[in-house]
Image (cartoon, rainbow, N blue to C red):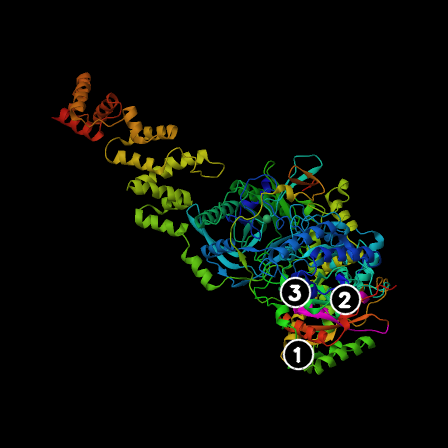
Amino acid sequence: MSRLDELSIEEASRRLASREISSRELTEACLARIEVTEPKVGSFLEVTAQLARQQADDADRRLAATGTRTSDTTALTGIPIALKDIFLTKDVRTTCASRILENFIPTFDATVVARLRRAGAVLLGKLNMDEFAMGSSCENSAMQLTRNPWKLDRVPGGSSGGSATCVAAHQALGSFGTDTGGSIRLPAAFCGVAGIKPTYGRVSRYGVIAFASSLDQVGPMASTTRGAALLLQTVAGKDPLDSTSIDAPVPDYAGAIGTAPTVKGLRIGIPREYFVEGLDADVEAAVRAAIGKLQDLGATIVEVTLPHTEYAVATYYIVATAEASSNLGRYDGVRYGRRRGEEQGLRDMYGESREQGFGAEVKRRIMLGTYVLSAGYYDAYYSKAMRVRTLIRRDFEQAFERCDVIATPTAPATAFEIGSRTDDPLKMYLSDILTISVNLAGLPGMSIPCGLDSAGLPIGLQLIGKPLDELTLLRTAAAYEDSCHWHRVSAELKP
Amino acid sequence: MPLDENEIRRVAVLARLHLGEDEVARLTGDLGRILGFVGKLAELDTSDIEPTSHVVAMSTPYREDEVTTGGDPDSAITNAPRRDGHYFVVPRIIE
Amino acid sequence: MSAARSYYQEGGFETVIGLEVHCQLATASKLFCGCSAAFGAGANEHTCPVCLAMPGVLPVLNRCAVDYAIRAALATDSTINTNSRWARKNYFYPDLPKAYQITQYEQPYCEHGRVTFDLDGTEHTVRLTRIHMEEDAGKSVHDAHASWSLVDLNRAGVPLLEIVSEPELRSGAEASAYMRKMRSLVRYLGISDGNMNEGSMRCDANVSLRKRGATTLGTRAEIKNLNSFRSIERAIAYEIERQAEILLGGGAIVQETRLWDADRGVTRSMRSKEEAHDYRYFPEPDLLPLVIDDAWIERARSELPELPDARRGRFVTSYGLSGYDSGVLTASKELADWFEAAVAAHDNPKALANWITSEVLRIANESGAEGETDFSQLPFAPEHLAALVRLIDDGTISGKIAKTVFSKMVESGDDPAAIVAREGLVQVTDEGAITAIVDSVVAANTAKVAEYKSGKDKLFGFFVGQVMKESQGKANPASVNRLLKERLDG
Ligand SMILES: [Zn+2]
């Protein structure tokens, strides 16, 4: 690899530490790559070039002052990354890809952002997404279209579409997204990168614009599992500002993966409910091949069952929209955000600001969520969904009595064509059919590339772990990666 | 799940969305189909099942009672669409 | 109204009242963020991203607020639920920045309590349905512009207790007495300043009427904006008549929220809030369940201060006061503290109690706001009152002179001994001086002396009065009596 922007995070980190390259050089390489590729891909809502150069120079000073890695530098010092536009960044416009926040300038950093700044990471900019993270294709952005770098007429997946495309197109070495029902794993699979959604509570949600609070979780994307591990360990851990963040030690994931991770003795569960009708043949073949590879590497394959899988999408769309309808009440045009209709009085100001500020999918979900919580329907929908959620959690608890990791496809098919599902919300919702249960159960899940389909589009292998056991996921993924080449195949930005 | 346009209008009032008539019609269809789909949960007997509202099995943590924030009304109103001094301004509220 | 009133007074209807008392907890910071909870600051001075409901912010619970809430539960003999939950109550209003209030709904931390209070010498007990914690909303200012309202979020997120009574109160007077007891309790507990003027304590009343003897409840109206004891009594009295009038006219009560308009003395329907009360409560996902274990409860119990009923009992047994006086003195913690400070300075509790319940309370009520007894405004300290009683007890001044000294204390705030010295009010006990006055009075009234000696005993009082007058009230009455008797009878 000669181009700096194509380096993995772990390799760039090594070269920065040894002063073979500077952060400024690396950052300039990414900015140049963004310049060239952005017209085709459209990952960024805002490129913070000036801030990035300044942070890169700061990082270089830190690296120079110490010479070697000491307490002042981290594995991320000088590494250029980008953030989904759902993370609040002090003094950098944060829109959540919504008109209602088109001019919103946060006065503080999300905890994740503060930790990344402290670690010395370089912020290249803010990434496109589905508005308020509601979508599976990135087509619900109110701002722009983002295209899949593998085939530009395809969606990148969503909602963290820009987070996947910026890594796949080598615009940034890594990125962060959020995952409420598959929003990291699905675009990671569609764009052929590694993405992990940690255990609910592993990473602080403070300063992350809420979609569905009991499901939202922050996670990284990178071209390699080790890169994702470095990103994750920088931001994970208890945050006193997030009451739902878990007070548990965060392992040195990258260190624990090491240079020769093994899956010997690992029990990998294969849930039969994830390999049924509608699963694309190429996807099934690639995923089964990957499982076979893991078996070759010493893992034991066991069949498990997750019987309530078929109820997951329905459960999710009740729980998530109910929470969203409440979370999005604050966009009322009073303290920030777009205001319309104030001349007609308060009632119209609310109605017009929200009507004009939110896009169609956001309004659809607010309406659905409001409906399922409203008097007379709560028991039939919301209360019912919370109980089915318990059944889905139990499925996993029982499955994990028999295995250490569960392996499935990340999505039933590869990236679909732009515009092909926008008219049918239900069809779009079913894109997340294989990722949603993981959020309902609060478990860690990961997607890594495991092949290409006949059209040359990436296929994702999903690994699901026990609560707080991200390490086993990462180790399994790294062992697989070390045995194959899929993560080294680059998107070519073809039409 | 039968859903009529008046029901959609009722929900839109609760949600403070000024929907146009075409949107009311479209949402009536969309929500009707989605509710039909999620209605499949009724197949399951959940009478003995505890609801899951949180997946984290902990009790809520505390902060100590100390004043640590505030005193910056300028930044409080910096994104406000309309303000008067340090107040937010809204169309007159009629009780 | 008169027909309704007379029917009501003749006992045709029974009034059913339940109160929802909102009480601001006296924590330093807000319930879910680190902003000051203090009253009175510039607009939005006490705000941060959390209480402004900026995107992405999250609540973290104030431990002290829970401590205070536990005290309230213990003081009302309530059951504390080990596990309770937070809920969101969703509605749009400019002073509600998140468009939901974090409160407790299905599983409050506290249930099944009771409170006893005294009204006109009768003890009443009211059961409490529940107590829960919640956050306050901000404040809107409506009168600054013709077409705009101003929003200040300093109060948004301030911790409140909502104390919900069973519908067991029967009159405005009972409701008001219950509220007084509740305020006394929270002040004793040190969990709230109970200040109704500043809105730290306020209540909503659910009022309905039913035919006497009926077992089901009538349709109720919820009256909001009751922020003084007088408002509670007046609003409930008005509402009873309004409902009685409707019922007697064959009409039906509409279940609605009504606002008390103190200026016009009426309750009126809140039309803007009529539309769909559909709060869409659901469990707050950003806060995990609240767990209050036995250790926490026991620690709180051991730190509980003496409460009004216990203190009243102690005043009867330790100070020998009547139950009534003890009740008056312990109704407010400030008054009871004031009394005990005076007793500590001079050990004559009965005399001090008399002075306080008659003279001092009158002064305090005059200086305080409506319905408030304000001890901070008294011009003298409890030690001054103790000094005054000591001057009487050691014979330095007479009880009569003491009244004069007391008024001077109220005027000047001076020490009573200083007043007595300055005004020359020391009692004359010098028998030579008194004898001289006696002699001059006898000499000046020879005719009366003759009448007395001929058997008109009643004239003795006349001579005492003359001597006291000559001495400007300062002669020791006992000495005057004895010396006069010696002179006239001897
Ligand atoms: Zn605050």
Q: Is residue C410 above or below residue A363?
A: above
Q: Which residue is mark 2?
A: A1
Between residues C44 and A415, which one lies in front from this camera angle?
A415
Asked whether residue A385 appears in the rendered view, the answer is no
Chain under callout 1: A
Looking at the picture, how far across and down is residue B61, in whole percent? Answer: 55, 60
Q: Identify the magenta region.
A: A427-454
CA separation in Å, label 3 and label 1: 20 Å
Compared across the picture, whether C383 is left or right of C248 comes to left
Question: N-terminal of the two: label 3 or label 2?
Answer: 2
Q: Which residue is mark 3?
A: A230
Looking at the picture, how far across and down is residue C409, in whole percent? Answer: 35, 30
Q: Are marks 3 and 2 in contact (CB under 8 Å)?
A: no
CA separation in Å, label 3 and label 2: 21 Å
- Asked whether residue A448 is drawn in magenta, I would say yes
Residue type at numbered disc 1: Val
- Asked whether residue C178 is drawn in magenta, I would say no
Q: Residue at x 68, y 79 (%)?
A: A268
Residue type at numbered disc 2: Met
Q: Which residue is mark 1?
A: A263
* Co-location on one chain, circles 3 and 2: yes
Compared across the picture, whether A458 is left or right of C72 comes to right
Quadrant of the rendering where the N terminus of chain A is positioned: bottom right
Residue type at numbered disc 3: Leu
